[in-house]
Amino acid sequence: MKKLIPYLAIILAMLIWAGAGIAVKEALILFTPLTIIVLRFTIAVLLMLLIGLLFRKNEIVGLQSLRKKDIPLFVLGGLFQPFLYFIFETYTYQAFTSPTIAEALLSLQPLLAPLFAFVILREHITRNNIIGIILSTIGVMLLLLVGTDNFALGSPWGVLLAFITVSMSVSYSIVLRRIPTHYSPLTIVFYVQAISLILFYILWGGNLLLNSSTPVLLNSSTPELLNSILSVLYLAIFASVTAFILFCYTVRQIGVTRANLFNNARPIFTALLMWWIFDEMLPVGKLIGILIIIAGLFISCIQRTEQ
């Protein structure tokens, strides 16, 4: 049972992040993208500071001070993700005429993770890892592309931007593996996000940016106003604190390759949430894609339990 905990943790993290896309859509009614990012990470950092101080001695959510020699790793982590990742992700979506194509390219993270992990960490890549990556990637392509009418790739720069975005996320995972094991997951996520938040504040300029329709919403008691505020709170508490801590814990337990493979589960959860909340149809091709992804994840993980 103890061996299953990291896998349950990463599945929960991916489920939370899958819901984040829906939350961002609701939050955009009131706030601009950059404002959403700054607000969510401001709330997240303050919340982690409070929890970390209250449960200082806890090995998972206790807040520890940093050793001077380890500070560069935390700075790198904050630079890679959330800071650069969110910036490049935004421009990636802008570069493509089809959001589906952008999502498909950004979902190829598990393909780069083993290469980065092998070159930098000398992390072993097994045959099951390779089979699982191939299967789950095929499943992601089916899930994202079945039923899509627009396959235009748009600017060639979009492909480069998507590659940089994915590289930032994988590099963040590498940094998590490099950080000494005596730091608690909350300590790591807190300092990484605090550093990233400082960079966002510098970019943001401290001005609260709202959408053009915001004055109308602020002068009324519309459900959209409440949904936008609740969505930001979801992004802060769950997507920026809970999911990041769970992901950090999992990477340090099962490695960069296996942890990043579970990113292929995010489109599954997104499709299921869209079906559940918005009654969006799931064609047979998408259902087949879901089954292939699950098979790929199972093949990659079952070898871990045998060791």
Image (tube, rainbow, N blue to C red):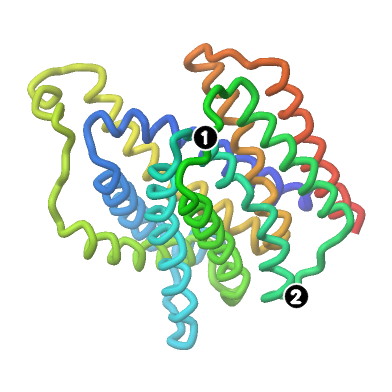
> Of the residues shown, which amino acid type is indicated by label 2?
Arg
Instruction: Give the crowd class for mark 2: few <14, some 14-19, many >=20 residues within 10 Å.
Output: few
Q: Alpha carbon of mark 2 to alpha carbon of mark 1: how far?
A: 38 Å
Does 255 appear above or below 272?
below
In this rendering, does residue 297 appear at all?
yes
Per the image, label 1 sits on a secondary structure element best described as loop
Q: Tell which residue pokes out farthest to the right in this image.
A: 306
Instruction: Give the crowd class for mark 1: few <14, some 14-19, many >=20 residues within 10 Å.
Output: few
Tell me if 211 is positioned left or right of 283 in this view. Answer: left
- Specify the quadrant that holds the C terminus: bottom right
Q: Residue at x 37, y 55 (%)?
A: 87
* In-front residue for pair 265/8: 265
Q: Which mark is residue 152?
A: 1
Mark 2 and 1 residues: CB-CB less than 8 Å, in contact? no
Residue 116 rendering spot, x and y as whole percentages: 66, 68
Whichever of callouts 2 and 1 sits on the residue coming sooner in the sequence is 2
Number of callouts: 2
Front tag of 2 and 1: 1
Q: Residue at x 73, y 59 (%)?
A: 254
> Of the residues shown, which amino acid type is indicated by label 1?
Ala
Per the image, label 2 sits on a secondary structure element best described as loop
Q: Which mark is residue 122?
A: 2
Q: Residue at x 15, y 27 (%)?
A: 213
Residue 91 rendering spot, x and y as whole percentages: 38, 49
Residue 258 rendering spot, x and y as whole percentages: 73, 55
* In-front residue for pair 195/62: 195
Residue 67 rendering spot, x and y as whole percentages: 46, 84
- Tell me the quarter of the picture where residue 259 sits: bottom right
